[in-house]
Image (tube, rainbow, N blue to C red):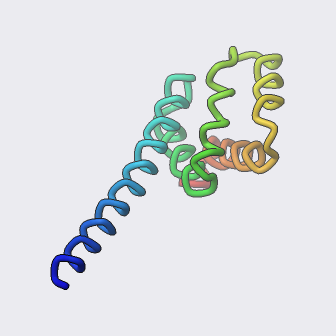
Amino acid sequence: MFGLVKSLFTLVGLATALWFGAHWYAEYRVRTAFAEAGMNDKAAACMGRRLVKRLSLPQLRRLEAFQAEKHTVGGLLRAVRQVDDSEVIAVTVSSAALCATGLAR
């Protein structure tokens, strides 16, 4: 009986570590991508926190379309068409506006 409880706690601990590790890594990747794109570090960290809180991991993967495109208006339009998820677009745009103006931390 004790072995079963110990195994259950170990499994729960491992699942928790994987969950938080995946989100930490996703935030790191988002923050780094925005910083490499030219956003200042404070705004990039704000974007990373907001996007990871509000979007699922599969939705965050869709944001990679923005990273692949060139930094032009045409590239932005192509990336938006590739994402094809209105929630991702809305959260990204609102987060960018709030983080760039300093209204969000």
* Picture residue at 55% right of the left edge, 31% below the top: 34
Q: Is residue 72 above or below residue 32?
A: above
Q: Is residue 5 above or below residue 37?
A: below
Residue nearest the viewer, comparing 7 with 61: 7
86 vs 55, left or right, is right
Q: Position of residue 31 (x, y in %)?
A: 49, 37
10 vs 45, left or right, is left
* Picture residue at 59% right of the left edge, 49% below the top: 51
* Picture residue at 30% right of the left edge, 66% below the top: 11
Q: Position of residue 94 (x, y in %)?
A: 72, 48
Q: Position of residue 72 (x, y in %)?
A: 75, 16
Residue nearest the viewer, comparing 98 with 86: 86
- Quarter of the rendering occupied by the N terminus: bottom left
105 vs 6, left or right, is right
**Residue 15's quadrant in the figure?**
bottom left
Q: Across the whole image, how many numbered discs are drawn on residues?
A: 0
Q: Is residue 62 above or below residue 1?
A: above
**Residue 8's quadrant in the figure?**
bottom left
Q: Is residue 5 above or below residue 28?
A: below
Q: Position of residue 84 (x, y in %)?
A: 81, 38
Report the residue that reaches farthest toward the bottom. Answer: 1
Report the residue that reaches farthest toward the front. Answer: 1
* Picture residue at 62% right of the left edge, 56% below the top: 54
